Amino acid sequence: MTEDDWMIPNIHSGSSDTSEPKYHYNTGIQHTQHTQYQPIRIEKPVGMSVEEGVTELNRFKIIFLDEVESDIWHLIKNSKKRDVTAIVAGGKEYRGPPDHTDGWTRRLWAMLRNKNTINSALPVYEGEELDSWLTGQIMERAETLYEKFIISHSDIRGKVMLQQLRETPTAHKAIARQFVASVRESGEPLSEEMCKTLIHLISEQMANHTTDQLGQQLGQALLHVGGVSAISTFATAMAHTMTSTVAKLAVKIATKISAKTALKAGGKIIGKLVLSTFITSLSTAAASKGMGTLAAFLSAAAMPIIIAAIVAWEVSEFTENLANKIAPEVRQIMAGTFEKQNRSVLAMIGKDTLEDLGIQLAKTLALDSSLVESAKEAASEMVKAKLHVSK
């Protein structure tokens, strides 16, 4: 079969343009304007625009935010003392006491000296911003929860992808060609004429237009040859299978959806809150042990006292207090970026990914034996209707 054979024919028989092949019907019967026929229904796969997808995802916003707040609360509440007291510089993987050999005490000292400005800016140590190690864990968990959310609604993302495929004419040809080629490669007997009719049918089914001229032409032709509507049966099966298959493929394509963009600014807000709460709690713990307040801890000589306060610290009360403050804050950040992030994720698929999706979709569809059998019956019926290509 040559490249020309794969061309999608122009079905507008009234056109005088003969540069592309056209489908014609030759039933051998003279039609009159009073001939009654029932158009063949060619069901199209149901897609969804990006904005429609955003609207659909918004329906699950409260449920998602409830899960985020609850999960983050438990993450913080169940943290160990080593985690909640760890202070990192420049995002590096430092840990907290009892291991002080990595400069933890110096970072703690730098943080305490800047305790009055933490709410406006993170403290700096040796040119790098200081932060709680726990901040990174909170951010990572929030990103994971968002990724889980998007994957759980792959049906919505799949419909958006399907609509993008329908709005890309080259994808129609690619899907139709690949499906027929995969069916033939599996050993299924398809004549050249059956291949041409299937390619045309699938391409028209994918086309993003509301008119159904092909269905009208087929209905008129089959009126005189006793068609049993295998075409309509295949089109319906193809549309439904295509919709469900795209949803599954949507999970495999770019499943690592990161919320880092949404949380980047929020990360510093969380970091400041964690550090300020840490200092307040440390001051309270020190005072309860008769060590005075942190206002007096402004010399290196005081560091052993601070370390002693941390060692004696009952961390469960601090983590619960921290969880009560941080979890709602994370919820608020995620709520503020929810719609924008969803829109970005739904629209992020590029041309190359879209083409790959079309090929993978066609190959997957060709593995469905019942769909392939239905395709053969539809092709036979189209040939029976004497639909052929002429140049």
Image (cartoon, rainbow, N blue to C red):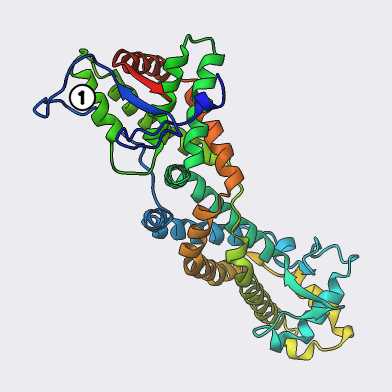
Please give the name of the residue rendered at 55% of the width and 38% of the height, measured from the top-left corner: 357
Residue 200 screen position, x and y as percent: 41, 28
51 to 222, vertically: above or below: below
Q: Is residue 354 visible?
A: yes
Q: Which residue is mark 1?
A: 220
Residue 305 screen position, x and y as percent: 82, 79
The furthest residue to the left:
34
Q: Element under label 1?
A: helix
Q: Is residue 361 left or right of residue 94?
A: left
Please give the name of the residue rendered at 36% of the width and 26% of the height, measured from the top-left corner: 23
Q: Is residue 237 visible?
A: no
Q: Is residue 120 left or right of residue 206?
A: right
Q: What amino acid type is highlighted by mark number 1?
A: Gln
Residue 136 screen position, x and y as percent: 68, 62
Residue 259 screen position, x and y as percent: 59, 59
Q: Quadrant of the N terminus?
A: top right
97 to 147, vertically: above or below: below
Please give the name of the residue rendered at 34% of the width and 23% of the height, measured from the top-left corner: 234
Q: Is residue 38 left or right of residue 296?
A: left
179 to 260, vertically: above or below: above
| Mark 1 neighbour density, 10 Å: few (under 14) some (14–19) many (20 or more) | many
- Residue 376 position by quadrant: top left
